Amino acid sequence: MSKEANFENALAFAADLIRIPGLPGEEGDVARRVREEMEALGLEEIRVDDAGNVIGVARGRGDAPAALLNSHMDVVAEGDHDEWEVPPFSGEVRDGFLHGRGAMDIKGPLALQTYAAASMIGQAPGDVIVAHTVLEERGGLGMKHLLESGSVAPGVVVIGEATHGDVCIGHRGRAEVEVAITGLAGHASVPARAHNALDLLGDVLAAIRDLAEDQPSDPILGASSLIATMVDVLPESRNVIPDSAVVTIDWRILPGSDDEMLENRVRDAISARIPETPEGLTWEVRMAIERQRTYTGLVEDRNLLTPGFLMSADDPMILAAAEAVGRREGQGPAVIRPWKFATDGGWSCGVHGIPTVGFAPGEERFAHTNRERMDVEEARWGFERYPLLIAAVQKALDE
Ligand SMILES: [Zn+2]
């Protein structure tokens, strides 16, 4: 006999998950707990893949395209515990809110999605795959791996990042690009024997500003934007002329941008400012790379590019989702809008072209703060709407 897939049990599961910390790359204990709950709820084909993502399937009654419900298992660091009004790992319900790190980003929605899927066993128009991923807060290695592995083949993806009850259809992506200037180090007392990497810094920064003034714009997502955020100089000594200066650029990108395109744009802007590189100095543009390790031991040197995506607001699947969800207060379909922040939807839709939509309770302004919380009544409403949303998007895709 499976555990009953009702809201009270979902909320208790969310509180339990909050009590299990799990920074990016340290989701093992959370994953074990998620797997245990999937088993108790009667999901099938429960498995943990190489990256540590946990996957289970709620069998539908028909053969409509499978819907994949996705939340992530990692949370951002909680910071100073004294700064929290309610302790970050208490999972306490107080004044009508579930409190703690992950309450709305994203353990609350993770629990609601898992339970909504379980509540539709034998009833959904098609299979409902539940796949909760790792390392979302570090750019989405888990989701990237899940989709590349081919172990799931959804017709639609539903992302559980906070929408406050709206239907979200996309967001900008993010990339980190570096400009590395190289020269020859030397004693600061004998400048003639060295080539100072800092000599090109002014022009490089000016080129980045030139490029920032010339960014493409999208009517829904707004303009892409970039800014220099860091300069690393080596050797780190006040009396040595440095041979290395690396400028980091934070770039909020529109869907469809790739490594090569971004690198080329920076190269062109720098070439315009530095038509002839002075002797003894070189510069190169490259994507920033970070070595990431999953709790299962998978290691990947990842380009720091998280793609954006955008679904059409007129897409029949999106309209069906908004209609099914409705407005929490007032009449008519749910508001359709983009998110301000990036999600794993960039991988599913932006890279793999799978129709993707976002729906979850929770207010963006509480994410990553020491006031993180989820309104219990809003969560109850969201839980009730979730099966309607899943059925609607599956039917829309089946037509
Ligand atoms: Zn999140």
Image (cartoon, grey):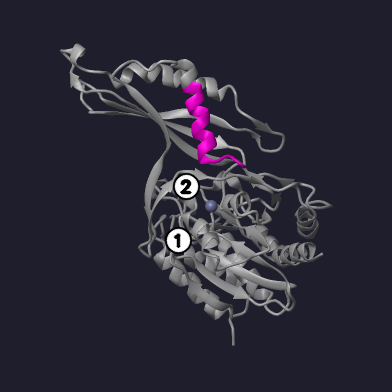
Residue 228 in which image quadrant: top left
**Alpha-carbon neighbours of circle 1 within 10 Å: few (<14), some, or many (≥20)?**
some
Was residue 83 drawn as part of the magenta stretch in this picture?
Answer: no
**Alpha-carbon neighbours of circle 2 within 10 Å: few (<14), some, or many (≥20)?**
many
Q: Residue 237: which disc?
A: none
Q: Nearer the viewer, residue 53 or 14?
A: 53
Q: Is residue 80 visible?
A: no
Instruction: For mark 2, give the secondary structure.
Output: loop
Numbered range of the magenta stretch: 256-270
Pointer 1 residue: 90
Point out the tag, 2 or 1, that comes first from the N-terminus: 1
The three-letter amino acid code for the residue at tag 2 is Asn
Q: Position of residue 351 (x, y in %)?
A: 59, 51
> Which residue is the extreme one toward the bottom?
1
Q: CA distance from mark 2 to mark 1?
A: 13 Å
Q: Residue at x 51, y 48 (%)?
A: 371
Q: In the rendered view of the protein, which quadrant contains the N terminus?
A: bottom right
Q: In the rendered picture of this protein, how many numbered marks are placed on residues?
A: 2
Confirm or reject: label 1 Cβ below 8 Å from ligand 1.
no
Was residue 264 drawn as part of the magenta stretch in this picture?
Answer: yes
Pointer 2 residue: 370
Q: Residue at x 49, y 76 (%)?
A: 36
Q: Position of residue 180 (x, y in %)?
A: 36, 29
